Image (cartoon, rainbow, N blue to C red):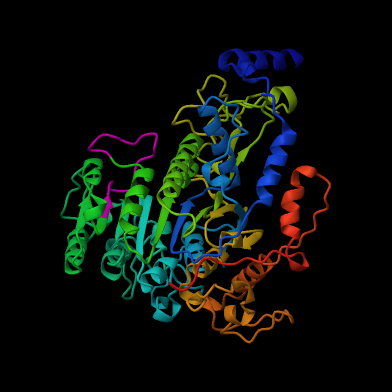
């Protein structure tokens, strides 16, 4: 047995250079790392301005393990061990965890999570933009009273500009939840409703984008076939359109934009995209693929290819920011999710770095004093990092289980793996021996424990990162729909449209936040009623966050001279609390 174990270990070492994976960790002054972070934390100031603009970045499927793996992957691509690297949005001062379960599911789908984020309401599985009175496929329940407005709708109501950018189809669950209402996320085009014998007068998602939300000024992603009749062939790949109602929604979009007097462009490739001059453009419809856009590792960067997520984000902001009242922009890294579903971890991690580039560009183009930026995942995946690998070990490579935690079958395994998915090979006896397989390949499929055609979502919490006006309200562990309330409150729209006077913001009374409730914050009595969807808990959390963040008790004892000055500044206020004056006011 010992001989076999040694033989297996040597085989792995020489065939995959596992033994070379161990590096000498760089010299690190860990005390300085910690004190620098503490000093930075003591200097934090709350931005209580009105959020003129909001940019919501959703990494579809970007759970904690995905962020961690992407961080390491980024660092290793730059020649570092990787673990010490940080992503741009990890620099944001305010971080929280989001509880992603749906109204009816322990592990959610993207429609109900995106609806929670954008509308401030937890709903049911597969539901887009409706409350929990609507269940999957129930067309008759699609009534006006069951509709819930998204942050995009609220910004439009306030006269601000709106946009949606995604690497998935524009009609896919996450982007659809910003503008559409549907009892089934799959109802992306009319033929689907007919094929599934849906009765009623429900409208497909592509139809809703063009006819019911023509005010959206920027809409870019994939999914051309959902907008074109089945008598039309796609100009890129020759595939037929999917619509059977005879509508050419691209032409209809152009007609509606012309009726509004907007200077508009419909673009399908990188060259057409690059020719758009934001200064002379009011609206854009970009449909760059017949279905989803390409993974970044496959993306055609030539003129007949497609723009990156960063480039689409830049163009969208340049167009939308011309509105002096402000704008809302949704940016989705949709293919993180798809990489995970296929158990192709490298593809998922590359998509996270693509999203990071888009976040960095948004920071460059906006003013942090007036722009709230939120980065979060909508849900996680059954994606794990394990095996006790050495510091700096290739995150895409093999762990070193034979050294510390031998696998019972004496076969190597990768640091990254999945709980379920197509990576489980059940056609052979025992687990596949991956000794001679290049696990760093773009197309390598990680092993999984349970064989399913498409890997499932994960149910654990996901991170939220925030910076800008009212971003300090992103803290602690929150219900996912709380994010929707924070955005409405920060921008003074929707339920919080009457809470715009922030000259004396710390004196706001709970009754402002609970104007449609009989409620006593002191009594702790939960009531039900008229707030959005009866969403009492989100309002309570928002109120608690809001008031607690304006009384920061100085509990520090002067024990380190390096921080005495910072502590004295905090202590100088009357009664040991920090009062915050807002720069903003009604505009």
Q: Position of residue 399 (x, y in %)?
A: 64, 27
Q: Is residue 208 left or right of residue 415?
A: left
Q: Is residue 181 visible?
A: no
Asked if 401 appears above or below 188 in the picture, the reply is above
Residue 128: say if magenta. no
Query: In which image quadrant can residue 147 be found?
Result: bottom left
Q: Is residue 58 left or right of residue 17?
A: left
Residue 296: say if magenta. yes
The magenta segment: 285-305
Identity of the residue drawn at 33% across and 60% down: 188
Q: Nearer the viewer, residue 549 or 179?
A: 549
Identity of the residue drawn at 38% across and 44% down: 310
Q: Is residue 284 left or right of residue 153?
A: left
Q: Which quarter shows the N terminus?
A: top right
Asked if 323 appears above or below 406 in the picture, the reply is below
Identity of the residue drawn at 61% across and 28% down: 413
Q: Position of residue 119 (x, y in %)?
A: 48, 68
């Amino acid at each position: 047995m010992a001989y076999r174990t040694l033989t297996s270990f040597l085989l792995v070492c020489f065939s995959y250079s596992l033994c070379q994976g161990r590096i000498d960790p760089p010299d690190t002054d860990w005390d300085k790392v910690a004190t620098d972070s503490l000093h930075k934390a003591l200097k934090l100031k709350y931005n209580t301005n009105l959020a003129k603009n909001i940019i919501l970045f959703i990494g579809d499927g970007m759970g904690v393990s995905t962020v961690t793996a992407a961080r390491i992957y980024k660092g290793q691509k730059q020649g570092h061990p990787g673990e010490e690297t940080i992503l741009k949005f990890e620099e944001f001062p305010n971080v929280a965890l989001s509880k992603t379960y749906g109204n009816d599911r322990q592990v959610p789908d993207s429609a109900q999570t995106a609806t929670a984020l954008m509308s401030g309401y937890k709903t049911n599985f597969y539901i887009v933009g409706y409350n929990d009175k609507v269940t999957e496929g129930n067309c008759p329940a699609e009534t006006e009273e069951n509709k819930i407005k998204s942050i995009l709708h609220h910004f439009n109501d306030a006269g601000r500009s709106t946009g949606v950018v995604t690497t998935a189809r524009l009609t896919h669950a996450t982007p659809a939840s910003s503008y559409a209402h549907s009892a089934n996320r799959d109802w992306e085009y009319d033929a689907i409703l007919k094929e599934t014998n849906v009765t009623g007068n429900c409208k497909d998602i592509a139809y809703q984008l063009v006819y019911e939300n023509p005010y959206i000024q920027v809409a870019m992603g994939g999914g051309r076939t959902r907008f074109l009749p089945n008598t039309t062939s796609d100009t890129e790949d020759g595939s037929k359109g999917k619509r059977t109602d005879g509508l050419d929604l691209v032409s209809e979009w152009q007609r509606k934009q012309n009726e509004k007097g907007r200077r508009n462009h419909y673009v399908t490739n990188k060259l057409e995209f690059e020719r758009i001059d934001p200064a002379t453009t009011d609206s854009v419809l970009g449909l760059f693929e017949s279905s989803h856009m390409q993974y970044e590792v496959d993306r055609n960067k030539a003129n007949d290819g497609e723009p990156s997520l960063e480039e689409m984000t830049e163009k969208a902001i340049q167009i939308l920011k011309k509105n002096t009242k402000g704008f809302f922009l949704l940016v989705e890294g949709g293919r993180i999710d798809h990489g995970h579903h296929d158990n192709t971890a490298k593809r998922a991690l590359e998509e996270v770095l693509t999203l990071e580039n888009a976040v960095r560009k948004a920071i460059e183009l906006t003013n942090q004093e007036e722009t709230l930026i939120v980065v979060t995942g909508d849900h996680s995946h059954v994606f794990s990092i394990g095996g006790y690998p050495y510091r700096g070990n290739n995150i895409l490579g093999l762990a070193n289980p034979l050294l510390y935690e031998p696998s019972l079958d004496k076969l190597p395994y990768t640091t990254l793996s999945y709980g379920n998915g197509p990576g489980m090979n059940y056609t052979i006896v025992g687990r596949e021996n991956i000794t001679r397989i290049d696990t760093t390949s773009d197309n390598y499929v990680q092993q999984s424990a349970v064989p399913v055609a498409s890997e499932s979502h994960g149910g654990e919490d996901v991170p939220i990162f925030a910076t800008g006006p009212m971003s300090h309200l992103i803290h602690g562990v929150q219900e996912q729909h709380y994010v929707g309330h924070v955005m409405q409150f920060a921008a003074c729209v929707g339920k919080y449209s009457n809470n715009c006077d922030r000259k004396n913001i710390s004196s706001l009374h709970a009754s402002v936040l609970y104007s449609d409730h009989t409620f006593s914050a002191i009594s702790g009595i939960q009531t039900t009623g008229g707030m959005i969807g009866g969403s009492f808990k989100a309002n309570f959390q928002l109120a608690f966050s809001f008031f607690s963040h304006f009384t920061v008790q100085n509990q520090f004892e002067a024990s380190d001279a390096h921080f005495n000055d910072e502590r004295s500044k905090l202590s100088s206020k009357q009664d040991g609390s920090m009062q915050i004056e807002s720069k903003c006011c009604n505009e």
